[in-house]
Amino acid sequence: VCSQLKTPWEETGGNLKGDDSYKAPFVWNNVDLGKAPAIETQKLAPSTVDPAGEDEIALCNHNVTVKYNPTMSECHVASALAATSEFELEKGTITLHVGEELPSDDEGDE
């Protein structure tokens, strides 16, 4: 849907929103919102050679390390292939490692 939007540039002279020649910034070009988007299925598998990396997050009051185990190039290809994708992840493609519990905010007030 977004790829079918046309966003015209407004001219810098004058207040177009008050002029008769004003055009809305987004113009729909015969987009059928009732039509289901094309979904591309992509498969990702873990790599033992060069995994993409990891992120550390706080989840349910614990430090959690999220490990992205496919290669970085596989992740880039998967993200660039389609606007709407369904991913089939082999076992171990993304792993969560739950760490220590985060300290309570109340403990710092003492």
Image (tube, rainbow, N blue to C red):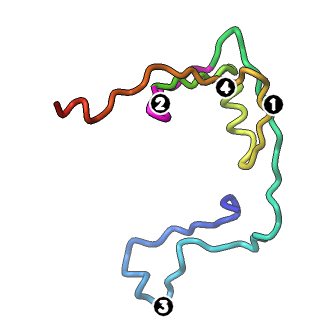
Q: Are marks 3 and 4 in contact (CB under 8 Å)?
A: no
- Point out residue 87 in the picture as x, y percentages from the top left corner: 77, 37
Q: Nearer the viewer, residue 91 or 7?
A: 91
Mark 1: few/some/many CA within 10 Å (<14, 14-19, 20+): few
Q: Are marks 3 and 1 in contact (CB under 8 Å)?
A: no
Please, what secondary structure does the residue beneath circle 4 have?
A: strand
Please, what secondary structure does the residue beneath circle 3 have?
A: loop
Q: Is residue 104 magenta?
A: no
Magenta range is 52-62
> To which quarter of the image does residue 47 belong?
top right
Mark 2: few/some/many CA within 10 Å (<14, 14-19, 20+): few
Compared with 15, 31 (above or below) is: above
Residue tagged 2:
57
Three-letter code for the amino acid on which mark 2 is drawn: Ile
Closer to viewer: mark 2 or mark 3: 2
Three-letter code for the amino acid on which mark 3 is drawn: Asp
- Counting residues from the N terminus, which is met first, the one under dot 2 or under dot 1? 1
Residue tagged 4:
94
- Counting residues from the N terminus, which is met first, the one under dot 4 or under dot 1? 1
**Separation of marks 4 and 1 at Cα, in angstroms:** 12 Å
48 left or right of 35 in image: left
- Point out residue 86 in the picture as x, y percentages from the top left corner: 78, 42
Closer to viewer: mark 3 or mark 4: 4
Residue tagged 3:
20
- Counting residues from the N terminus, which is met first, the one under dot 3 or under dot 1? 3
| Residue ID at (64%, 23%) | 95
Label ID, residue 43: 1
**Separation of marks 2 and 3 at Cα, in angstroms:** 51 Å
